Amino acid sequence: MSDETSPSCTCIFWGVRGSTPCPNREQMEYGGNTTCVQIQLPEREEILIFDSGTGIRNLGQHLMQREHDLSGRIFITHPHWDHIQGFPFFEPLRGTSNRFHIHMPVQEEGSCREIMLGHFSKTFFPVAMDSLDAELSFVNQPPERRSYEGYEMEFMKASHSINTAIYKLHVNDRQLVFAPDNELVPSTYCSDPEQMGRIAAFINGADLLIHDAQYNLDAYENRQGWGHSPWEEVVRVASRSKVRKLCLTHHDPGADDEQLRQLDEHLQQEYGSCFETIELAKEGQTKKI
């Protein structure tokens, strides 16, 4: 658990939707952009980003208002479209004095660099990667805990269809766990209890857990093995793992604001006593850790 006297960092949600963007009026309260989260580090200018879904476009527009050069790291959990489709539209990539490191676990189809270059191939996008002016480096992120400028990062492999990271950020004795695509399998369906145990241990005592909760148990019954969690199981595991703050994300594209609002209220009424805070992630929301 964290030392409350140490400086906190701020988590900003720029995209919270799963699978596909949803630019619909009935989904604007919680947001229609796909996954992107920014971490503002205490007393540091470095930019730290998790995932580059469509939400990263608005983040880029925001960052370009700064009057100095931009540098930072983008930690991508995996290269499914909803986690990388905003990358070409991240405006700071076009600044000649900007510098970014792109991190991602190695995939069966290739390295971080190979995957991202493929995303920029003529087949999928009209602008080639080498036309970007920013200085870019590509990192095959290892699971082992690594030190960066003022923080440390590690990951464990998620329960998902490809090699996907559950990232754990360590900063000033605080821990943030980012798991937008991870299938927590209820015990009635679970074929790998050891994996579920490893995940519970990894998130144990986290100050903030941002976790996939795309389904409820009824919907999950017909979506087993799709790589996403029922919110009921996330709440159960997070509570048992003594997570301080729980934020549920990767909202289903079929869920409108009224549905999400009702779930949000239910979570706070029924499970508020189990956490310091429990809520659904909203685009534009900020949280301190």
Image: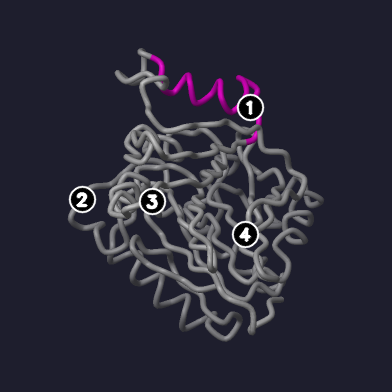
Horizontal side, residue 65 vs residue 105: left or right: left
In magenta, the rendered stretch is 105-121
User: Residue flagged by tag 3: what amino acid is it?
Assistant: Arg
Query: CA–CA distance between discs 3 and 2?
Result: 12 Å
Horizontal side, residue 21 vs residue 195: left or right: left
Residue for point 23% across, 47% down: 23
User: Residue flagged by tag 4: what amino acid is it?
Assistant: Val
First reached walking from the N terminus: tag 2 or tag 1: 2
Task: Count residues near mark 1 (Cα–Cα under 10 Å), then give few for <14, some for 14-19, many for 20+.
Answer: some
Q: Which residue is mark 3?
A: 17
Residue for point 58% across, 53% down: 179
- Numbered disc 2: secondary structure: loop
Query: CA–CA distance between discs 2 and 4?
Result: 29 Å
User: Residue flagged by tag 2: what amino acid is it?
Assistant: Asn
Q: Which residue is mark 2?
A: 24
Figure quadrant of the C terminus: bottom right
Labelled disc at residue 107? 1
Based on the picture, tell me whether residue 246 belongs to the magenta stretch: no
Task: Count residues near mark 3 (Cα–Cα under 10 Å), then give few for <14, some for 14-19, many for 20+.
Answer: many
First reached walking from the N terminus: tag 4 or tag 3: 3
- Numbered disc 3: secondary structure: loop
User: Residue flagged by tag 1: what amino acid is it?
Assistant: Gln
Q: Depth check: 24 or 209 in front? A: 209
